[in-house]
Amino acid sequence: MVSRKQMPNGVAAMPSQPAPLPASKLPAPLRFPLVVILSLTLSALLYSFTSEFTAGDLSSVSRSLNEWWQVSGLVGWKATELAIGWWGEYDSIDLASLTLLTHMPPLYLLTTFYGIRPTSMLASLLIDTLTTYIPFRLLRPISPIHNVSAPKGAVSNRSIINDLPVRVYTTVLAASIYAVTVYASFATWLPVHLVVHFEGLRDISAAHSAALPFLICSFLPVGYAAREFLFSPATGAKKDLGDIRNEAFNPETATLSETVRYNAWGFSKRTRTMIKRTATLVTVTALNTWLQTYVTIEGSESYGAAGWSGVWALAAALAGTVFWWVADVEGVSN
């Protein structure tokens, strides 16, 4: 792996502001409602097209959602996920990465312990990811972090973010964090937890026969998504007004409110970005995994779904922490 001391230097601390990338010409108040409509419509169409191949698998383990409030709750949560991406100022790659990371855990449960075919799981995950990526791609420009054609001064540490070995290492690192977390859970408390709190499990042997190298390889797409959602935006974050205020902070002349703010949130833009994105990933992972597991899988208990979601929320928190440590090195500009 590239030495932490040998990473290439980033760009200057405060270059002139680059020209913004072009945005949608639609009126701003119409963009988010259109995102929601496009996403829900695409989701309905794609699931209808693939129902011949996936419905038999998924319907055999799914609860019957016949009440209006059940369907409304799931649609409302879908809109909430889109709102998190929209007002969090994520681009299409950010939100697609977040979707993959947060929608994979319940599907992985179905494939591993309910005998659902991997092709059905992959089809569902691909649909969920595409139906967030496409509307955002149409209505919001790619951020400079993910745009190789963006002006050179738009992103800090461009040479690190685009370096192929760093891409590979950080992807494998994140995949390993998720794999080790799942593997450790399989080797300790999780099998008993699943048996006790999930009725209808078809096969628990995967928890006892799991091989760490295989898990790491299986989680490489997860690792890449975590890299794109956590590592790249934090490493590429440029200094902002908050950094200037932090550098100018004088404890001898600061007011009480300024001192409290500095002590509570006086971090660099890179650290603040990593904290906010990690908190978002952990929260959405926990909520979506619990919701999709408890509400949609027949025989699952609330406590059982909470335990399963906790495994993935912990993995997300560890990935964010390790990525923060990796990015906090000499040669990486703040």
Image (cartoon, rainbow, N blue to C red):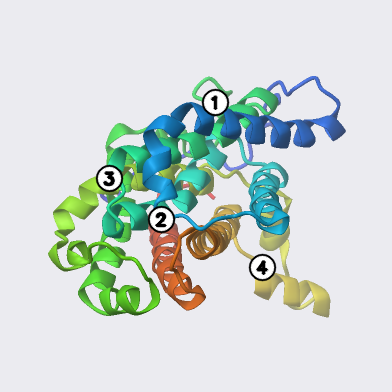
Spot occupied by residue 17 in the image (x, y as percentages of width and height): 69, 31
Q: Which mark is nearer the camera, 2 or 4?
A: 2
Spot occupied by residue 314 in the image (x, y as percentages of width and height): 42, 68
Residue at 65% from the left image edge and 26% from the top image edge: 141
SS under mark 2: loop
Cα distance in 3D space between marks 4 and 3: 30 Å
The answer to whether the residue labelled 1 contacts the one labelled 2, judged by CB atoms less than 8 Å apart, is no
295 left or right of 24 in image? left
The correct choice, above or below, for 183 with respect to 18 in the image is below
Quadrant of residue 177 within the rendered picture:
bottom left
N-terminal of the two: label 1 or label 4? 1
Residue linked to disc 1: 152
Spot occupied by residue 265 in the image (x, y as percentages of width and height): 66, 68
Residue linked to disc 4: 265
Q: Amino acid at mark 1?
A: Lys
SS under mark 4: helix
Q: Amino acid at mark 2?
A: Val
35 left or right of 44 in image? right
Q: Amino acid at mark 4?
A: Trp
Other residues around mark 2 within 10 Å, as few (<14) / some (14–19) / many (≥20): some
Residue linked to disc 3: 169
